[in-house]
Every structure is written in C-alpha cells, then in structure tokens.
Image (spheres, rainbow, N blue to C red):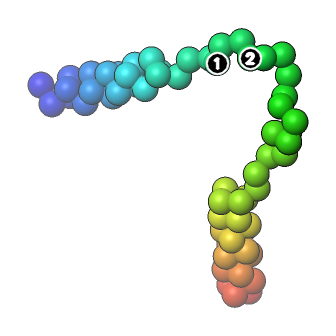
Amino acid sequence: MKHVILPVLILFLVLLGSSSTQAQGPGLGGPRPGATNAPLDGGASLLLAAGAAYGLKKLRRR
C-alpha cells in the first residue's frame, strides 16, 4: 500500500501545480514605456554569490 500512495501523491501534486500554470491572455499590443528593463536583483546576485563560493572552494582544495 505504501508503494502505491507515494506515486499517486506525486501525480496529484504535479497535476495540481500544472493546472495553475496557464498562458497569459492577449496584451495591449506591446511593451509599455519604461517596462522593457528586466530587474537583475535577487536571482542574479544569488547566482553570483554561489559561483564565487564554488570558485573559492575549488581554489582552496588545491
């Protein structure tokens, strides 16, 4: 019974998550003025810090 519950639970969670991911409806015909810049704040700085930490780890192993 335990081997059946886990796959069913995972399938349920995947289907539940995929139902909320729908494409956006039609917009107003183009980008708004001032809205063309992509913010590079949280995600890029975390990736940069992770890369620096990984590089330092590799350098210390030598």
Residue located beneath label 2 in the image: 27
- Percent across and percent down for residue 12 are 32, 22
Q: Is residue 32 toward the left or the right of residue 52 in the image?
A: right
Q: Is residue 14 toward the left or the right of residue 59 in the image?
A: left
The residue that appears at 76% across and 51% down in the rendered structure is 39
Which of 31 and 12 lies nearest the eye of the viewer?
A: 31
- Percent across and percent down for residue 19 are 45, 17
Which of 57 and 50 lies nearest the eye of the viewer?
A: 50
The residue that appears at 83% across and 31% down in the rendered structure is 32
Reply above or below: 8 against 41. above
Reply above or below: 40 against 31. below
Whether residue 7 can be seen here: no
Residue located beneath label 1 in the image: 24
- Do residues under tags 1 and 2 come within 8 Å of each other at their CB atoms? yes
Q: Is residue 44 toward the left or the right of residue 29 in the image?
A: left
Q: What secondary structure is marked by label 1?
A: loop
- Percent across and percent down for residue 3 are 20, 28
> Which mark lies nearer to you, 1 or 2?
2
Reply above or below: 61 against 2. below
Q: What secondary structure is marked by label 2?
A: loop
The residue that appears at 71% across and 65% down in the rendered structure is 45
Reply above or below: 32 against 35. above
Quadrant in the rendering for residue 17: top left
Quadrant in the rendering for residue 10: top left
Q: Residue furthest top?
A: 26
Find the distance from the CA under tag 1 to the CA under tag 2. Answer: 8 Å
